[in-house]
């Protein structure tokens, strides 16, 4: 049993080493930050989203607790994985909602309504996720920079520390990633038009 003064990094390392109770002790230390992260994600979603920050955190918790094979490095690594997990949950939710809209026993939509649906924030999240997957395939470190900066909200300095690279490298990777993603998403929009 570890002491009450354990840091999130201590608890993550203990969890990586097989101490099952470490994750349960970690959650109260990071729950406020996880709710802030969830609120940030949901703030980008459409109004009236069915998920609430607490539900998103709970779902992420259930998925994270099943990640037995991860060798946690530190707090930044945990929040990057939490951000990725939340993004996956929202993308899965958006895809499920989109599948219902495209059939799934629902009545046919008028052309005007279908065009309005195509521009919803959930659709953009799915497009962004697909673009990030393409980007990650050829630029894994730069994709990590995007996850840490955009989705987790880490500063340039925190991202550099988490990835063990220089601040200048993070700045270059961030600029490159934004340009690449903008071009990729603009290409998707042109192809869909």
Image: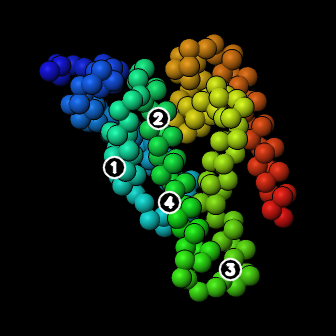
**Among the two numbered marks 4 and 3 on one chain, the one whose residue lies closer to the N terminus:** 4
Please report the residue visible at 55 percent of the width from the left and 73 percent of the height from the top.
100
Q: Is there any visible trace of residue 51 in the rendered image?
A: yes
Callout 3: SS: helix
Point out which mark residue 93 bears.
Answer: 4
- Disc number for residue 113: 3
- The number of discs equals 4
Please tell me whether mark 2 sits on a helix, a strand or a loop: helix
Q: Are marks 3 and 1 in contact (CB under 8 Å)?
A: no
Which part of the image, by quadrant, shows the N terminus?
top left
State whether residue 135 is above or below residue 188.
above
- Give the percent coordinates (x, y) of residue 184: 78, 45
Residue 81, label in figure: 2
| C-alpha distance separating marks 2 and 4 | 18 Å
Instruction: Say which label, 2 or 1, has the lower sequence index.
Output: 1
Question: For numbered disc 1, what is the local secondary structure?
Answer: helix
Asked if the residues shown at circle 2 and circle 1 are in contact, with their CB atoms under 8 angstroms apart, the answer is: no
Q: Residues within 10 Å of mark 1 (few under 14, many from 20)?
A: some
User: Considering only order in the chain, which callout, 1 or 3, is on the residue closer to the N terminus?
Assistant: 1
Residue drawn at 39 percent across, 29 percent down: 69
Q: Nearer the viewer, mark 2 or mark 3?
A: 2
Residue 94, quarter of picture: bottom right
| Res. 7 in view | no
What mark, if any, has residue 58 been given in the picture? Answer: 1
What secondary structure is found at the residue carrying circle 4? helix
Q: Nearer the viewer, residue 61 or 138?
A: 138
Q: Mark 2 or mark 4: which comes first in sequence? A: 2
Left or right: 142 in relation to 21: right
Q: Residues under labels 1 and 4: Cα distance?
A: 15 Å
Residue at image coords 62%, 54%: 126
């Amino acid at each position: 049993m570890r002491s009450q003064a354990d840091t999130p990094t201590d608890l993550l390392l203990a969890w990586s080493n097989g101490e099952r109770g470490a994750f349960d002790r970690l959650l109260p230390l990071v729950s406020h930050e996880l709710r802030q992260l969830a609120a940030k994600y949901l703030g980008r979603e459409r109004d009236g989203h069915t998920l609430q920050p607490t539900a998103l955190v709970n779902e992420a918790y259930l998925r994270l607790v099943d990640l037995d094979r991860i060798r946690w490095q530190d707090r930044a690594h945990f929040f990057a994985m939490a951000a990725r997990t939340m993004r996956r949950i929202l993308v899965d939710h958006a895809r499920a909602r989109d599948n219902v809209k495209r059939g799934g026993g629902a009545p046919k939509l008028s052309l005007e309504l279908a065009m309005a649906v195509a521009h919803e924030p959930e659709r953009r999240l799915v497009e962004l996720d697909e673009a990030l997957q393409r980007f990650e395939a050829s630029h894994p470190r730069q994709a990590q920079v995007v996850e840490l900066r955009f989705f987790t909200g880490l500063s340039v300095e925190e991202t550099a520390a988490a990835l063990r690279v220089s601040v200048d490298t993070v700045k270059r990777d961030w600029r490159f990633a934004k340009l690449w993603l903008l071009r990729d998403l603009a290409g998707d929009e042109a192809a869909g038009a």
